[in-house]
Image: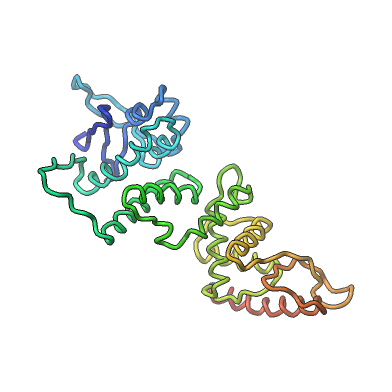
């Protein structure tokens, strides 16, 4: 119970305890600050993590067990709140309270202004501060199972509001985020009943490495089955636990390529000449020749088969 910290937000007490070096929040306090009328219902509706019971002394000196929630669940309550002050509470917690607790073990009120002119942050300071805010909120959003593009946008918005630094622009990931948002909005970026940002993000990473040559696999036309085999092998090697099914993978590749100005199309083609030649769905990253398309398709798939075998051996 000695690890208890109490701080006030708009004159309302919010208690924080340290458990194994990590801050846990008294769920009732957070719910009340965020305007939930029934804190038990709010915790049940929004908190997906494990809630713990923690003994705390009340104002009469009695030991009471309260429900405490983790940082990701605290973020879920913030996201679900309709109170205008929720955004200000989020800023307070992530930019003042948590950094202070992690640095000193407790929340310390900043010293009073003694009339000294404020030190204007230098660009490097602003970038470092923005990076801390951005990374903290993206991690929390990921643990809270927010869609990745939404978590990135929210984190970037808060970081820019507080520091003036646009982390999306700083990291050069605007096109990446837009591509993820496109599939999410179209419904193709969803996996089951939740935003499938991890699955779609794996396709984006695979396609970008394939297209820019860093994957070690030539970016050329092939069958959709060949491309999917390369993708699933890459996911296993990269430790990506979320993969899209083949049809959604193909749609995601087309979307990525279109947004990068390197449009890929899908077309059923015969892999050779004559009616006896097998047909397959081709992922075309370049225009096929006007004539002898069957022979061309057979040749490029044969070439890609050899390249794919080498790629699979290289990544194990």
Quadrant placement of the N terminus: top left
Residue 118 vs residue 51, the one in the foreground: 118
Residue 34 vs residue 31, the one in the foreground: 34
Farthest residue to the top: give it: 60
Q: Position of residue 10 (x, y in %)?
A: 27, 29
For the point 60% across and 78% down, the residue is 310
| Count of marks overlaid on the render | 0
Residue 308 vs residue 8, the one in the foreground: 8
For the point 33% across and 54% down, the residue is 130
**Above or below: residue 134 compared with residue 257:** above
Where residue 112 sits, quadrant-wise, is top left
Quadrant placement of the C terminus: bottom right
In the image, 34: left or right of 226? left
In the image, 165: left or right of 270? left
Farthest residue to the left: give it: 114
Task: Give the colour scheme shown.
Answer: rainbow
Where residue 251 sits, quadrant-wise, is bottom right
Residue 154 vs residue 141, the one in the foreground: 154
Answer yes or no: is residue 109 visible: yes
For the point 43% across and 47% down, the residue is 154
For the point 51% across and 47% down, the residue is 147
Q: Position of residue 277 (x, y in %)?
A: 84, 74
Where residue 72 sits, quadrant-wise, is top left
Q: Position of residue 8 (x, y in %)?
A: 24, 31
Answer yes or no: is residue 242 visible: no
């Amino acid at each position: 119970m000695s690890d208890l910290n109490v701080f006030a937000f708009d004159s309302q007490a919010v208690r924080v305890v340290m458990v194994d070096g990590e801050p846990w929040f008294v769920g009732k306090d957070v719910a009340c600050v965020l305007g939930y009328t029934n804190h038990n219902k709010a915790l049940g509706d929004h908190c997906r993590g494990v809630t713990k019971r923690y003994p705390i002394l009340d104002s009469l000196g009695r030991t009471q067990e309260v429900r405490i929630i983790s940082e990701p669940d605290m973020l879920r309550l913030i996201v679900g709140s309709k109170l205008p002050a929720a955004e200000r509470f989020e800023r307070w917690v992530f930019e003042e309270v948590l950094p202070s607790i992690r640095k000193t073990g407790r929340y310390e009120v900043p010293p009073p202004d003694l009339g000294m002119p404020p030190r204007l942050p230098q660009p490097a300071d602003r970038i470092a501060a923005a990076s801390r805010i951005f990374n903290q909120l993206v991690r929390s959003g990921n643990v809270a199972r927010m869609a990745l593009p939404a978590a990135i946008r929210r984190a970037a918005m808060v970081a820019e509001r507080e520091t003036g630094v646009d982390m999306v622009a700083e990291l050069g990931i605007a096109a990446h985020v837009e591509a993820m948002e496109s599939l999410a909005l179209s419904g193709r970026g969803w996996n089951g009943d939740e935003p499938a940002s991890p699955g779609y993000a794996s396709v984006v990473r695979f396609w970008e490495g394939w297209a820019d040559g860093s994957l070690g696999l030539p970016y050329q036309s092939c069958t959709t089955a060949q491309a999917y085999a390369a993708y699933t092998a890459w996911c296993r090697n990269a430790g990506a636990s979320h993969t899209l099914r083949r049809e959604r993978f193909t749609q995601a590749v087309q979307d990525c390529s279109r947004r990068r100005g390197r449009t890929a199309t899908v077309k059923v083609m015969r892999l050779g000449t004559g009616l006896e030649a097998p047909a397959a769905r081709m992922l075309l990253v370049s225009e096929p020749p006007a004539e002898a398309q069957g022979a061309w398709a057979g040749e490029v798939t044969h070439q890609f088969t050899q390249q794919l075998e080498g790629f699979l051996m290289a990544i194990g």
